[in-house]
Image (spheres, rainbow, N blue to C red):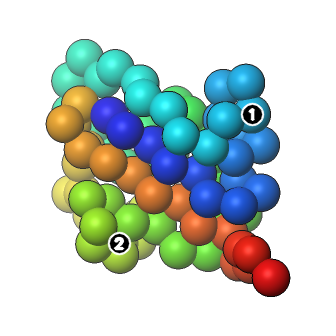
Amino acid sequence: MRVHLWGELGFYGPGRRGKFEIQLEQPMPLVEALKLIDVHLPDVAVLALNGDVVRADEPGLTVTDADRIDCFPPTSGG
């Protein structure tokens, strides 16, 4: 799964990198994938799955190894 943590959220990425990939062995709920990559949901203002804005707690929303997650903080840039 491709992950892009925008702005200061890049702090949560491995080696404090904002762009990285992780391997998912099986589909899982989006909220569980966010826990797996150690992103703190209160710090995420906008969440996108494959380019579509979603809510982390949407029932039945799962991710696979082929997906991309983008997490945006409340402020980014200046």
In this view, 68 is above or below 28: below
Q: Give the residue at mark 2.
A: 54
Foreground mark, 2 or 1?
Answer: 1
Mark 2, secondary structure of its residue: strand
Q: Quadrant of the N terminus?
A: top left
* Crowd class of label 2 (few under 14; some 14 to 19; many from 20; radius 10 Å): some
**Amino acid type, label 2:** Val
Question: Mark 1 or mark 2, which is nearer the start of the sequence?
Answer: 1
Would you identify the image quadrant in which residue 32 lies?
A: top left
Q: Is residue 44 left or right of residue 27?
A: right
Mark 1, secondary structure of its residue: helix
Q: Is residue 35 left or right of residue 62?
A: right
Image position, residue 37 (x, y; %): 56, 34
**Amino acid type, label 1:** Arg
Would you identify the image quadrant in which residue 55 lies?
A: bottom left
Q: Give the residue at mark 1.
A: 16
Q: Quadrant of the C terminus?
A: bottom right
Q: Is residue 46 left or right of residue 55?
A: right
Q: Residue at x 34, y 20 (%)?
A: 23
- What is the number of callouts on the image? 2
